[in-house]
Amino acid sequence: MHASGMPQADTPTLCRACLETWPQGLQQSDAAEAGCPSCGLPTLRSHAELFDLTTAHIDCDAFYASVEKRDNPELRDKPLIVGGGRRGVVTTACYIARRFGPRSAMPMFKALELCPDAVVIKPDMAKYRAVSQQIRVLMEELTPVIEPLSLDEAYLDLADDVRLDHRAPAVGLADLAKKVRANVGISISIGLAPNKFLAKLASDLDKPRGFAVIGAAEAEAVLAPMPVGAIHGIGKVTASKLAARGITEINQLQAMSDAELRAAFGKFGDRLAQYVRGRDPRVVKTERATKSVSAETTFNVDVADAGTLVERVAPLADRVAARLNEKGYSGRTVVLKMKTSDFQILTRNRQLPAPTQRADLMMAAAAPLIRREADGRRFRLIGIGVSDLTSSAEADPPDLFAPAVRSDDA
Ligand code: TTP
Ligand code: MG
C-alpha cells in the first residue's frame, strides 16, 4: 500500500519541490535514491493514479499556531499553544507542543500540565481570516470549484483544466503548497483522491507539509485498518455504540453487506456502505451565498414569561455571534422567530444602525420584540438570527467571539 506515495520505480512520479514529472515513472536506479533526479531534494511522490486524480482536500498545518509563528520567528522552535480566551481551551497546538500531548479542545490547564514550557497566545481571528482569504486567492488560480469547510480547509475539484496549461491536478496542487509557503508563510497538507471522502482522509495521512494520495484501486485496503471514527459522520457517540458491539475498525464495516449496514444505521447506512468501499457520490460544492445566520431552540415545556424567553434566547445570540465571527460575516437585520404552542410561526425584524457580530447588540434589538409578543401566549420555540449579511470588515469591533466554538458545533 502506498497511500502516502514514496518514490517507486515505473510508477508516475512528481517532485513537489521542482514540479518535474515522470509520467512513466523513474528508472529503478533513480527510484532507489532518496532525492529527486532533477533537483536533488527528497520530495518525490509516486502513485499509480497520481496524474489521474482530480479531487483534493487542503488543510493548513496547525493553522492558528503556524500563523503566529510566521509573525514571530522567535517562536519557531518553541512549543506554542493558541488558546485561552473565554472558554479556557486549546484551539490548536503547534506540532512541537503536540509531542507532549496538548490537542485542540483540551482545557488549557491540562495542556499546560503536559507541556509547561509552552508559549500561550490568544487567538486573533481577524488575522486568521485574512490568511484564509490569501490562501483562497491562490486556490482560485487553480480552480473555481472550491468548497471551504472552515478557515483552514477546503475541497477543490480540479477535473477541468481551467488554466489550459495541461498540468495534472497533482502538479498544480504541489505548486499551490509552494506558493502558500512562499507568499503566505505557512504550510498546508494536501490529500488527492478520487472523491471528497478519500481526499479528506488523505490530507491527514502525511501531516504536516503532507502530500498524500489515495487511489481508487487501493481505497478499500487503506480504509480497512482505520478506526471507524475516521469516517465523516461517525462521531464519538456512534463510535462508542459501535465499540459496544465490538466494531472498532472499518474492515468490520466492510465485512457487512449494504443491507446489513442499512439495517444497523438507517439512512446513513447507505452513505456508509459507499464510504467503506471508498466511494463517495458527493460533488465539490462551490459556496452558495449564505443569506442569514441563525440559531433556535425548542423548549421542553412551553414558555409564556417574557423574562424567561429573553433569557433563553441569549445563548442562541452567543452562538449566532460565534458563527458570524467564524465565517467572517456581520448582519444588519436582527430576525426573531417564535413558534406558539399551537404552531403559529412569528418572525419579527429589526434593522440596526450598522452591521453587527455582537450578541449583546442582537439581544438589545430582540428583547423589546420578545416583550411585545409575550402577551400571555405560550411559546414552544424561539430563535434569533441576522440577515443582510456583509463582510465582518464592516462590523463593529468583534470582541465577543468564543474561539473554541466552531461552526460545526453550532
Ligand atoms: P484543524 O485543521 O482541525 O487543526 P490545525 O490546523 O490546528 O492542525 P492540523 O495540522 O492537525 O490540521 O483546525 C484548524 C483551526 O481551527 C485550528 O488551528 C484552530 C481552530 N480549532 C478550534 O478553534 N477548535 C478546535 O477544536 C479545533 C479542532 C480547531
Ligand atoms: Mg488544519
Image (cartoon, rainbow, N blue to C red):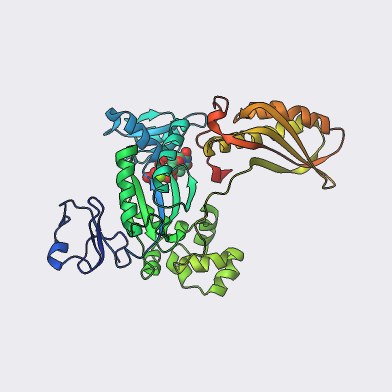
Q: Residue furthest front?
A: 164
Is any atom of residue 238 visible in this view? yes
155 with respect to 336 (left or right): left
Quarter of the image where ligand 2 sits: top left
Residue found 54% across the figure and 57% down from its top:
238
Residue 111's quadrant in the figure?
top left
For this rendering, which residue is in front, 137 or 59?
137
398 with respect to 350 (left or right): left
Residue 259, horizontal then vertical, whole percent: 57, 74
Residue 216, horizontal then vertical, whole percent: 39, 68
45 with respect to 228 (left or right): left
Q: Residue furthest left?
A: 29
Residue found 30% across the figure and 30% down from its top:
75
Residue found 30% across the figure and 66% down from its top:
1
Residue found 71% across the figure and 28% down from its top:
365
Residue 269, horizontal then vertical, whole percent: 56, 66
Q: Quadrant of the C terminus?
A: top right
Is any atom of residue 99 visible in this view? no
Residue 282, horizontal then vertical, whole percent: 52, 61
Residue 55's quadrant in the figure?
bottom left
